Image (tube, rainbow, N blue to C red):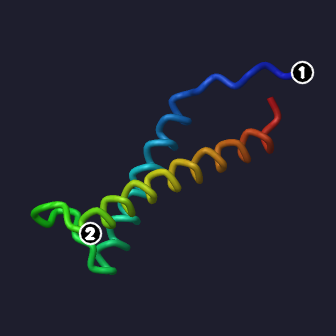
Amino acid sequence: MSAPHTPSLADGIADAIGFVGGALAGFWIGQWLGFDIFAPGYGTKTLLGIALVGLGGGLGLHAARRWQASRRERTPD
């Protein structure tokens, strides 16, 4: 069996880029759809915009981790 993977600085940077990139994508999709997360109050459109940012950040982080796992499988130790 192989030893468990210990996180490296590259893993952390990839996670951060994936999360921030996904959150920004969610923000801009929300803006395009008319959901302003900075609108005063917590109306439906504001909450949907916040949810899109969170969903985008989570999906970006998931994509970054899948990319890291695929790179680990391809490179010999």
What type is the residue that disc 1 sits on?
A: Met
Task: Report the disc number at residue 1.
Answer: 1
Q: Residue visible at 45% across and 57% down?
A: 55
Is 11 left or right of 41, judged from the image as shown? right
**Alpha carbon of mark 1 to alpha carbon of mark 2: how far?**
51 Å
Q: Residue visible at 44% across and 43% down?
A: 16
Percent of width and height locating residue 33: 33, 80
Task: Report the disc number at residue 48.
Answer: none
Q: Residue furthest left?
A: 40
Is 9 left or right of 25, judged from the image as shown? right
Q: Which residue is mark 2?
A: 44
Above or below residue 17? Residue 35 is below
Above or below residue 64? Residue 3 is above
Above or below residue 47? Residue 14 is above
Of residue 12 and residue 61, the one placed in the foreground of this image is 61
Instruction: Count residues near mark 1 (Cα–Cα under 10 Å), then give few for <14, some for 14-19, many for 20+.
Output: few
Element on which disc 1 rests: loop
Above or below residue 74? Residue 56 is below
Earlier in the chain: of badge 1 and badge 2, it is 1
Percent of width and height locating residue 29: 37, 73
Element on which disc 2 rests: helix
What type is the residue that disc 2 sits on?
A: Thr
- Name the quarter where the N terminus is drawn: top right
Q: Residue visible at 32% across and 80% down?
A: 32
